[in-house]
């Protein structure tokens, strides 16, 4: 009996790119819930069965398509190290898969579905959120070693701040991230918060939340 994996169609190169482009366009136009394999098959003139053999579920297909547009490098490497925290964060935010990518419509189409689909939400966090957070944490870790950030700073909180502000601006105020906007948020909020941790000692555990 042949190995089932050898029966899967080889969809790659320009054909794969064509499918991913169609999926993202349909996702933005109709939303995740209304996106169907039938619609994708029609858009790219492909067999629905062929699509199913390559992507068993809609989540598999959508996340692969979104990965082609939003994914950041899987691991933070030496190329991320520009020598300063500000430059590192600008490079990450304004590079491929960063906050400045043309992604608001895609995220807007996915977020409502993620509230209802725990598997989709978990997969999105694993494939897109965590790698970006890991790169930011690595940048703050290097900054801490250089003395730009205090030894007791909450790096996880600092690493989330830029994305939190930019995503909030996008969804609430329709203010999209641009290199200028990213630099403004860094200079006004993130870097002052990082500098404020220098020389800061953490509060004693029994003093947190205590009443006078």
Image (cartoon, helix red, strand yellow):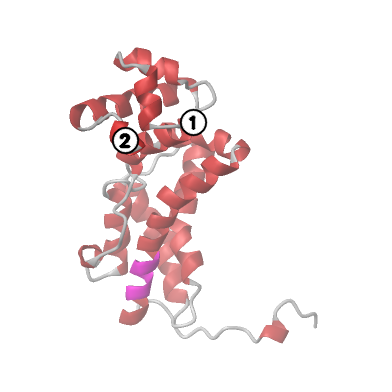
Number of numbered discs on residues: 2
Classify 10 Å Cα crowding around label 1: few (below 14), some (14-19), many (20 and above). Answer: some
- Does residue 77 show up? yes
Q: Which residue is mark 1?
A: 109
Residue at image mark 2: 2
Which residue sits furthest right? 212
Vertical placement of 91 versus 206: above or below? above
Please, what is the dominant secondary structure of the magenta stretch?
helix
Residue under the image location 31 percent in, 55 percent down: 74
Q: Residue at x 33, y 48 (%)?
A: 98
Q: Quadrant of the N terminus?
A: top left
Judging depth in this view, the residue of 13 and 90 nearest the camera is 13
Percent x, y of residue 27: 43, 26
Q: Where is residue 202? Give x, y as percent.
A: 57, 83
Q: Secondary structure at mark 2?
A: loop
Magenta stretch? 137-142
17 and 186: which is toward the camera? 17
Q: Is residue 152 above or below residue 182?
A: below
**Residue 108 shows up from this direction:** no
x and y percent of residue 153 in the render?
48, 76
Q: In the drawing, does residue 29 fall left or right of residue 68?
A: right
State which quarter of the image contains the C terminus: bottom right
Q: CA distance from mark 1 to mark 2?
A: 39 Å
Magenta stretch holds residue 149: no
Residue 211 position by quadrant: bottom right
Q: Name the secondary structure under disc 1.
A: helix
Q: Is residue 39 above or below residue 55?
A: above
Q: Residue 208 location in percent, x, y?
A: 70, 79
């Amino acid at each position: 009996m042949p190995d089932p994996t050898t029966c899967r169609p080889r969809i790659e190169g320009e054909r794969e790119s064509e499918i991913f482009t169609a999926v993202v366009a349909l996702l933005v136009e109709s939303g995740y819930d209304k996106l169907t394999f039938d619609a994708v098959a029609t858009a790219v003139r492909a067999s629905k069965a062929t699509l199913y053999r390559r992507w068993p579920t809609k989540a598999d297909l959508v996340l692969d398509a979104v990965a082609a547009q939003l994914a950041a490098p899987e691991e933070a490497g030496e190329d991320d190290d520009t020598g300063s925290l500000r430059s590192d964060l600008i490079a990450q935010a304004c590079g491929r898969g960063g906050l400045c990518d043309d992604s608001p419509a895609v995220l807007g189409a996915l977020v409502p579905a993620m509230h209802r689909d725990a598997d989709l939400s978990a997969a999105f966090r694993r494939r897109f959120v965590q790698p970006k957070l890991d790169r930011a944490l690595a940048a703050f870790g290097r900054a801490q070693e250089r003395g730009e950030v205090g030894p007791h700073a909450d790096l996880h909180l600092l690493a989330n701040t830029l994305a939190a502000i930019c995503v909030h601006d996008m969804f609430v105020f329709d203010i999209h991230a641009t290199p200028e906007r990213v630099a403004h948020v860094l200079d006004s909020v993130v870097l002052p918060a990082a500098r404020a941790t220098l020389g800061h000692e953490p509060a004693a555990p029994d003093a947190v939340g205590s009443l006078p």
